[in-house]
């Protein structure tokens, strides 16, 4: 006697070939979960702005908790850094997003960048106030630094140095 299989598994894989591209607000509002899948599978390249903007508009009609889950899901699936940043920028404008852990991370990153930029600006203001010439290379190095502690050391040195390049002298205290 021949045995008949009792179970046949046919996996269904989602991808750009079988998920429609949703790039208008009207389409996205009609089926938000499908718009989420569309953003996940098509959210890169030149069509990314239309796809992500239509999704963001549609998410305004969804309750905050579900919208936050959708955003996190799409964010984790986007492989294009520009598209990921675009989504984050779109979402930061929406009130519900501010409660989401991803939003907290984005805000903290922004605060840290702001503190770092302000410290770099304070170094340049101090040198200007002291009438010390700042060559472009020195200015560029100060503005390029993302190390808050390093900038703090340079700010302390800015009150004592004779030339702008002396800021980088690690022998000074």
Image (cartoon, helix red, strand yellow):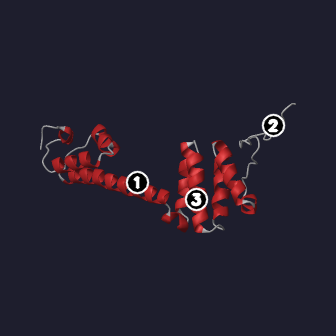
Q: Is residue 166 left or right of residue 69?
A: left
Q: Of all residues shown, which one is farthest toward the top?
A: 1
Residue 31 in picture, x, y percent from top left: 74, 60
Please name the residue shown 76% across and 48% down the image: 20
The circle drawn on residue 69 is: 3
Counting residues from the start of the chain, the first of labels 2 and 1 encountered is 2
**The one of 65 and 17 positioned closer to us in this rendering:** 65
Residue shown at 18% from the left, 48% from the top: 158
Q: Are marks 3 and 2 in contact (CB under 8 Å)?
A: no
Tell me if residue 50 can be seen: no
Q: Looking at the image, which is closer to me, 33 or 155? A: 33
Q: Which residue is mark 2?
A: 5
Percent position (x, y) of residue 171?
12, 37
Tell me which residue sits at (64%, 51%) in the image: 49
Neighbour tally class for label 2: few under 14, some 14-19, many 20 plus, Cα within 10 Å: few
Q: Which sits earlier in the primary sequence, circle 3 or circle 1?
A: 3
171 to 60, vertically: above or below? above
Inter-mark Cα distance, 2 to 1:
55 Å
Which label's residue is closer to the chain start, 3 or 2?
2
**Mark-to-mark CA distance, 3 and 2:** 39 Å
* Residue 135 found in image quarter: top left
For numbered disc 1, what is the local secondary structure?
A: helix
Kindly report which numbered mark, 3 or 2, lies closer to the viewer in this rendering: 2
Q: Position of residue 162 (x, y in %)?
A: 13, 43
Answer with left or right where residue 54 lies relative to residue 135: right
Q: Identify the residue position indicated by label 1 in the image.
A: 109
Q: Position of residue 81 (x, y in %)?
A: 54, 43
The quadrant holding residue 104 is bottom left
Q: Find numbered disc 2 in the image and state the secondary structure of the residue it sits on.
A: loop
Q: Say few, some or many: other residues with alpha carbon within 10 Å of mark 1 (under 14 / 14 to 19 / 20 or more).
A: few
């Amino acid at each position: 006697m021949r045995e008949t299989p009792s179970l046949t598994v046919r996996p269904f894989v989602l991808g750009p070939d079988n998920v429609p591209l949703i790039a208008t607000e009207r389409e996205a509002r009609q089926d938000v979960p499908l718009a989420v899948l569309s953003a996940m599978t098509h959210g890169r390249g030149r069509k990314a702005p239309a796809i992500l903007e239509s999704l963001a508009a549609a998410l305004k009609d969804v309750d905050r908790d579900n919208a936050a889950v959708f955003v996190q899901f799409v964010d984790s699936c986007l492989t294009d850094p520009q598209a990921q940043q675009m989504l984050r920028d779109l979402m930061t404008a929406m009130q519900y997003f501010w409660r989401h852990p991803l939003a907290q991370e984005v805000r903290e990153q922004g605060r840290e960048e702001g503190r770092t930029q302000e410290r770099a600006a304070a170094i340049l203001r101090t040198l200007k106030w002291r009438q010390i010439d700042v060559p472009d290379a020195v200015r560029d190095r100060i503005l390029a630094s993302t190390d808050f502690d390093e900038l703090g050391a340079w700010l302390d040195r800015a009150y004592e140095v004779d030339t702008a390049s002396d800021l980088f002298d690690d022998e000074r205290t």
